[in-house]
Image: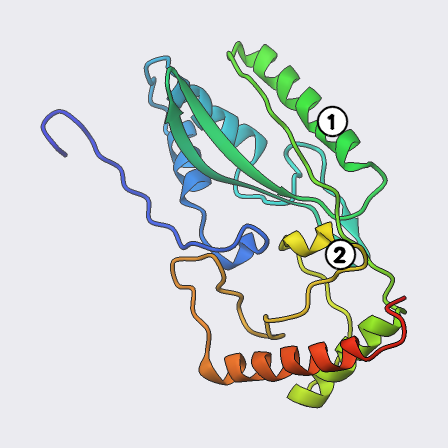
């Protein structure tokens, strides 16, 4: 209590949006608490946001409440994560991060489906909402390429671990280049801490990265073809 006010603090654990299961999202948890509290809050953009978050996302991060959940055999499931709220002039902005694997719908088609569902929800609830839905194209490469086999050999030779292609929901500007893929520096079986409040790199893993990247430049640079 602070005077006549009740201050509610929800503490979460930060995680990369590509791996929401590694964290604890305070945004959706606070929304769920307030939406189900039974308290008659004053009409406002904040009250709308609370119900919008709880009704369309909740504690699920695969798009089940929105009816857009799907999964790819190699890339894994769709991930949808509300990340923050921000006051902008006379409006309240709610940001939601979408990580979409390859599927039956193109990124543009999936964006349109999400926009239609949320538009219908806002109309039903009488909410004044402006939607901006953008989903970038996924990055899926042919795993049989000689360049990929070279990278897998480098990883296996350096770490002594089984080397096989893995999927990541993380994004990278490398996908702007033709034939590019992610290579390192996340190690299998270890929680990815990039872009979090606890971001760090173990020295032994850093030394392995340096060795692998050096090998990569030497071996890839001497290949006759990258096809």
Please tell me the numbered disc located at residue 75.
Answer: 2
Q: Which mark is residue 113?
A: 1
Residue drawn at x 37%, y 25% is 87
Using a 10 Å C-alpha cutoff, classify the residue at mark 2 as few (fewer than 14 neighbours), some (14 to 19) or many (20 or more): some
Q: Residue at x 80, y 47 (%)?
A: 102
Quadrant assignment for the N terminus: top left
Q: Secondary structure at mark 1?
A: helix
Give the mark, 1 or 2, whose residue is nearer the N terminus: 2
Element class at badge 2: loop
Residue 161 is left or right of residue 222, and the answer is left
- Distance CA(mark 1)–CA(mark 2): 21 Å
Q: Furthest residue to the left?
A: 3
Residue 55 picture location, percent across and down: 55, 29
- Above or below — where is 55 with respect to 154? above
Compare residues 221 and 184 and report the one nearer the observer.
221
Give me the residue at 53% from left, 68% from top: 191
Residue 29, percent from left and from top:
43, 41
Left or right of residue 69, residue 16 in this image: left
Examine the rendered structure and indicate whether residue 101 appears above or below residue 148.
Answer: above
Which image quarter is the C terminus in? bottom right
Residue shown at 69% from the left, 46% from the top? 78
Q: Is residue 225 left or right of residue 198?
A: right
């Amino acid at each position: 209590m602070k005077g006549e006010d009740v201050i509610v603090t929800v503490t979460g654990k930060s995680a990369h949006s590509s791996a929401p299961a590694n964290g604890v999202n305070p945004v959706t948890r606070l929304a769920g608490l307030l939406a189900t509290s039974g308290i008659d809050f004053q009409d406002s953009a904040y009250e709308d946001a609370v119900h919008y978050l709880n009704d369309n996302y909740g504690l699920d991060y695969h798009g089940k409440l929105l009816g857009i959940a799907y999964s790819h055999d190699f890339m894994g499931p769709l991930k949808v994560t509300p990340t923050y709220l921000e006051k902008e002039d006379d409006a309240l902005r709610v940001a939601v991060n979408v990580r979409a694997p390859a599927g039956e719908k193109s990124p543009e088609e999936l964006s349109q489906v999400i926009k239609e569902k949320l538009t219908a929800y806002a109309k039903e609830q009488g909410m004044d909402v402006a939607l901006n839905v953008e989903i970038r194209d996924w990055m899926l490469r042919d795993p049989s390429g000689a360049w990929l086999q070279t990278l897998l050999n480098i990883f296996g030779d350096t770490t002594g671990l089984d080397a096989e292609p893995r999927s990541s929901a993380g994004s990278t500007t490398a996908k702007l280049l033709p034939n590019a893929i992610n290579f390192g520096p996340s190690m299998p079986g270890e929680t990815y801490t990039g872009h979090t409040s606890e971001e760090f790199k173990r020295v032994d893993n850093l030394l392995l990265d340096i060795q692998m990247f050096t090998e990569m430049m030497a071996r890839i640079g001497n290949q006759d073809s990258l096809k």
